[in-house]
Image (cartoon, rainbow, N blue to C red):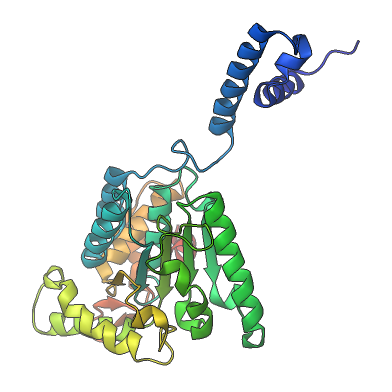
Amino acid sequence: MKARPPRAWTTLFLCILISGLVVEAIEPVSTSLLVVGTGTAMLGRKIYRYIYENCHENWVNFNATGLKYDLDTKLYGQHVAGQVILKAVTGFMNNENPKKPLVLSLHGWTGTGKNFVSQLLAENIYVKGMKSSFVHLFTATAHFPHEIHLDTYKTQLQDWIRGNVSICPRSMFIFDEMDKMHPGLIDSIKPYLDFYDNLNGVSYRQAIFIFLSNAGGENIVQVALDFWKDGKEREEIQLKHLETALSLSVFNNKNSGFWHTSLIDKNLVDFFVPFLPLEYKHIIQCGLAEMISKGHSPDKEVVEKMAHDLNYFPKEERVFSMQGCKVIPSRLDFYI
């Protein structure tokens, strides 16, 4: 008989453990062996849970301390967004019986950290982070490009959310480019964000929905610019200073994605989170962090050369970055 390779024996053993076939292979009638077989099957399921991702605390487990640390040390120049997100997510995740899913809408210019925050949230809730099968990312221009197919998109999106929440109630859905998404498509997911115990036997109250949008960016920038012109510190900006800017540019803007949607009328968005424009010093911080992530020793002189060549406004004072940190990974390679 030809010997099996070690990996084949391991696979066979796991299959036997998981299925409980050890009992049948020895003596299916014996009561004592039945007890052993049941225990073996339970052990097999435990092993399976550790090896393959599933909706269990081994794979889905909120790390509040880790999230706070990441927001404090990795998210640059966004004290308002960091505070709001930490409180909102921690409160929701610690609530054993939330009344509705958590719905966050992140607003600001490209490169200010919206996608990065989504990544940090995923990494502190799911062991596999953004690669988790329970994290679902949709991009308006890639997944819903043609308005003529709106009805098809609605059906597919509803089925996708329903199916995945059925598998794991603690699922996360991220919608990028919300300002480019058709309002009718947004309205189609409204029932899943509302105050329902369940819909057709499925409860959505533990799920998390995150909307990312550039809408409101110009108004948020204006607030930051006004503070700078008045000689005030950036850290003096509070959420209350930005709420009006968001309401004017998001709620009443036809290009915001939220315009006239029931999500606004029904107050289903828990927090509108503003992201401020980044300053030169934040670009330096992003650049140094990127050098480390690329395996290089942080070199401030190199990063400053890269940062100096980027575009800023006002034109003469060069205070705020027009591109943020998004271009740094590709730009930095040129200077290293």
Q: Residue at x 22, y 79 (%)?
A: 243
**50 on left or right of 326:** right
As displayed, is residue 53 above or below residue 146? above
Residue 72 or residue 130, whichever sits in front = 130
Question: Observer-nearest residue: 321 or 50?
Answer: 50
The answer to which of 33 and 301 lies nearer the viewer is 33
**Where does residue 335 sit, x and y in percent of width and height?**
44, 62
Q: Residue at x 21, y 67 (%)?
A: 80
Side of 49 where 21 appears, left or right: right
Who's the residue at 45% across and 74% down the image? 190
- In the picture, the quarter occupied by the C terminus is bottom left
**Is 224 located above or below residue 300 in the figure?**
below
Q: Position of residue 3 (x, y in %)?
A: 84, 13
Q: Tell me which residue sits at (36%, 53%) in the image.
A: 289
Taking the image as drawn, is residue 188 in sight? yes
Q: Is residue 282 above or below residue 318?
A: above
Q: In which quadrant is the N terminus drawn?
A: top right
Name of the residue lying farthest toward the left: 231
Image coordinates of residue 312 in percent, x first then y, are: 31, 80
Pick the front one: 243 or 197? 197
The answer, for residue 325, to whether it is visible in the render is: no
Q: How many marks?
A: 0
Residue 263 in percent (x, y) is at: 39, 78
In the image: residue 35, left or right of residue 129: right
Asked where in the image residue 255 lies, by quadrant, the reply is bottom left
Occupied quadrant, residue 197: bottom left
